[in-house]
Image: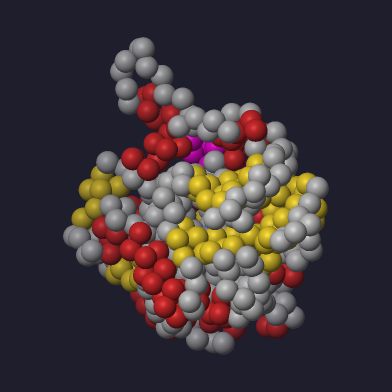
Amino acid sequence: MNQSNSDPTIQFLGATKTVTGSKTLLKVFGKKILVDCGLFQGPKAIRELNWQEFKEAESIDAVILTHAHIDHSGYLPKLVKEGFKGPIYCSAGTFDLCQIMLMDSAHLQEEDAKYANKSRYSKHYRALPLYETVDAQRALELFVPLEMNDWTDIFPMISVRLLRAGHILGSSFVQIKINRDYNPITVTFSGDIGNGRQNVIKGPVSLVETDYLVMEGTYGDRVQSKLDPSETLAQCIRKVAKNKGVLVIPSFAVGRTQEILYLLRKLESENKIPEIPVYLDSPMAVEATEIYMRHKDELKLDLEKGGFIEPLCSHSYKTVRSADDSMLLCMKDGPMVVVSAAGMLTGGRVLHHLKARLPKPENVVLFVGWQAEETKGRLLQQGLPKIRIHHQEVDIEAEIVSIDSLSAHGDTEDILSWIKGIEKAPHKVFLNHGEESALNTLKYRLEHELNFSVVVPSFEQEFVLS
Ligand SMILES: [Zn+2]
């Protein structure tokens, strides 16, 4: 490959053969542009990568975010702490969601450090948080929301546009155009791609052209269940309504919660379930729902239908903000539905609800998202007779139900159909954000079905785009 001095390079600094820590560095015309700035999450060996010094933080000229999920945005406060001062470009929806998500992430980092200090006895060791709320605030001051679909010049001869990715509110794929006199180049970063089957937000727009493509492959080797989740949800509600029980739905604050609220409203308006109180007990989910409703242009919902004030509120919908009210709710008699976080039971208010409701057979726990290995969520799905919550043994008599067709990611077929309409094969496709086996399966299909040239990059690997 003949490399000229002005040829851009691309380097993969996260989400290589894994699903967290998305960070891709594009160097062009002396500028360094970081696309996504995600936190590494999951096993300790992966989380420890967050603690490495980001040597180039000060010299990065701009960050562009595909969406607000912490595995794409959660490293920003650390980047700022290490000297980054440039603009952070993203959609308006992503900016709004980052305001709650980065502050929540900083709060969790502070709590982790406090907990570590409490449980260690050495006077010589003090755990520090990865970053603090003040770092998150400073990061938020650097945000520059962009209009979707329009090209914006961010540096001379470098422009950017965001196109709807349909994964969560505000999620976009990022196109960077390098407008050099000879051979201009467009590089596209997919971020996480939606599947178009969500009820609340609109699906992704198709990718039409790009010279290089950095693409996610989380579900690169899987086809998702396309079953309508409504009937399972309705059965759970009918059971608790009849037995005066409680349906506890552990849910992720952004995306999944809004889908559940929408389905509850729809089932009620179609008279498929009785009207029972629905409590949303998660301050972050309450705020995220309000943000969704402010960005109506991104929603599929027909706001006029059904005579509801807001299409995500069933008739007896109530939000719970204070911790005291949450504890009182744990003691309240059914029938009712409680939607609460965290979705995988890694912490949060839902644990109190489970402690109160799991020992009784009239109650139901409904999982609406994938439960990672070694989480309490996975343990409950395995049908154990007891579980430990807050250092207490809790009997499991409640019914445990799971719905697996509410994913916010596209599966293999969705990913392929997102790029099938492309006018000309890209010079190169880089697959990241996925387990290695998923990425290799997707690579094989792209090479054999679409004749694309595909690479699965390793951590810190760098490529020249000519
Ligand atoms: Zn995501």
401 up-or-down from 20: above or below? below
Q: Quadrant of residue 186?
A: bottom right
Which residue is nearer to you in this view: 192 or 405? 192
The N terminus: image quadrant: bottom right
Q: Which residues are the magenta region?
A: 103-110
State whether residue 70 is above or below residue 380.
Answer: above
Residue at 50 percent across and 60 percent down: it is 430
Q: Kindly indicate the quadrant of the structure image that contains residue 271.
A: bottom right
Judge whether 266 appears above or below 163 on screen.
Answer: below
Could you tell me which residue is drawn at 78 percent across and 61 percent down?
151
Q: Residue 411, percent across and down? A: 45, 73
Query: Residue 335: image x %, image y %?
Result: 44, 70
Of residue 254 and residue 219, the one placed in the foreground of this image is: 219
Q: Is residue 318 visible?
A: no
Q: Residue at x 21, y 55 (%)?
A: 386
**Residue 380, percent across and down?**
28, 60
Instruction: Report the residue that reaches farthest toward the top.
Output: 124
**Residue 107 part of the magenta segment:** yes
Question: Does residue 214 lie above or below 389 as drawn?
Answer: below
Can the viewer see residue 303? yes
**Who is closer to the viewer here, 422 or 266?**
422
Horizontally, is 199 left or right of 388 in the view? right
Magenta stretch encompasses residue 17: no
